[in-house]
Image (cartoon, rainbow, N blue to C red):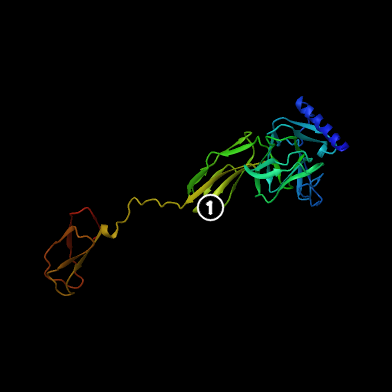
Amino acid sequence: MRNYFKKFSIMFAMALMLMFGWSISAFADDSYEIGTVNYSATVGSQLTSPEKGWKRADDTNSSIKYDGNWSTTNNATRYKGALHYTAQKGASVSFKFYGTKLRYICETWSPYPSNVSIKIDDLPNGNINQSLGVNYQCVAYEKINLPLGIHNVVVKMPNEGSWMYGWLDAIDIDDTGYLVNTTESITLDKSAINLTQDDSGQLTATTTPAGAQVTWKSSDPSIATVDSTGKVTGVKEGTCTITAITADGLTATCVVTVTPKGNEPNPNPDPTDTDKIVNIAHAKGDNTNNAGGDVTIIFHGSADTTLSVVKTADVKDVWIGDNFTYTLVITNTGTKTAKAV
């Protein structure tokens, strides 16, 4: 009973501090503590430092945003000697982190709400249980096996009930992860572009704050490449994704579709078989006398061209080695052109 009234007195004092707007200010601490020991902690465990494979950000990290009436209080039992708390219904805290796992470290006590909601990437992900008994630096929530990437987290106090105290002492994430500055952003001027093979297009990234460092990456350089300025070049037919990445891991993407290089049309194409006429002249006779010098015209294709034969001179005697000439007179009566005569 004595411990209960002691605890009650502490809570009453905190309520007065909130009522009169008192708070103990704390400078933002954006450093991390890297875990070195395996504690095999579970939800409900007291964890005064991060485990191996995890790292811890203090509640004063500048990437953590508090919405509503939150205050800070000093106590040696809290991580780095202080934490954030609120008695306001519906108050919330939000942050973004890069990684695959998350632990919410806070103070717990049986009268505190067990239904503090948490959403990850706008999806409900259970509740943070703050009613686990008297415990400081307690693992009140754990989420693992998230896809590697940036995740948006929103923790919100219930809108009804008693003892609506909410607490945040620290955030534990992957030892290779980090909290993302929510004031930063990146967008691309195009969400999709179409290129032909060997052609290029330009992507432009806009960042907040302006001028933030951006790196570029292609999901498949065999389909399309991208240089350090955002210039994209088609390599072969296919689809891939170009990603722009800020130093804090924020990303923006563009889908690139590459089509084969179109062959330029020949300004003087050869006619097709139905568009050409092949005319062959044969001189009939033997290698002795052939005074008649008969000539036969053979048509291949559409015969809408009239040909006639005119002998330039009468030939009476033809011997081996003699030359004589016939003239073909061609009159085109159609729209087609003779391929060869």
Q: Is residue 255 left or right of residue 329?
A: right
Q: Position of residue 146 (x, y in %)?
A: 66, 49
Q: Residue furthest top?
A: 20
Q: Along the line of sight, which residue is nearer the eye, 314 or 25?
A: 25
In the depicted structure, whether residue 97 falls above or below residue 316? above
Q: Please report the residue visible at 22 percent of the width from the left and 60 percent of the height from the top.
A: 302
Measured as percent of width and height from the top left, residue 129 is found at 74, 43
- Crowdedness of circle 1 by 10 Å Cα count: few (<14), some, many (20+)? many
Q: Give the quarter of the image for residue 273.
A: bottom left
The structure residue drawn at horizontal position 88% and vertical position 36%, both measured from the top left corner, is 2
Q: Nearer the viewer, residue 173 or 128?
A: 128
Tell me which corner region of the image, top left, top right, bottom left or bottom right, holds residue 333. Answer: bottom left
Residue furthest to the right: 2
Task: From the top left corner, tell me how far across and down residue 252 is, in percent.
Answer: 59, 42
Query: Which amino acid, mark 1?
Result: Ile
The extreme front residue here reads: 1
Res 310 → quadrant: bottom left
Give the image location of residue 304, x and y in percent: 19, 57
Q: Could you say which is closer to the camera, residue 315 or residue 196?
A: 196
Say how many tags the image has.
1
Q: Is residue 7 left or right of residue 249?
A: right
Question: Looking at the picture, does residue 25 appear above or below residue 111?
Answer: above
Image point 64% across, 44% down: which residue? 124
Quadrant for the C terminus in the image = bottom left
Which residue is more in the foreground, 109 or 80? 109
Does the rendering let one see residue 267?
yes
Q: Who's the residue at 34% across and 50% down the image? A: 267
The residue under label 1 is: 223
Picture quarter with the N terminus: top right
- Residue 226 appears in the picture as rendered: no
Name the side, left or right, on which 341 lies relative to 162: left
Q: Secondary structure at mark 1?
A: loop
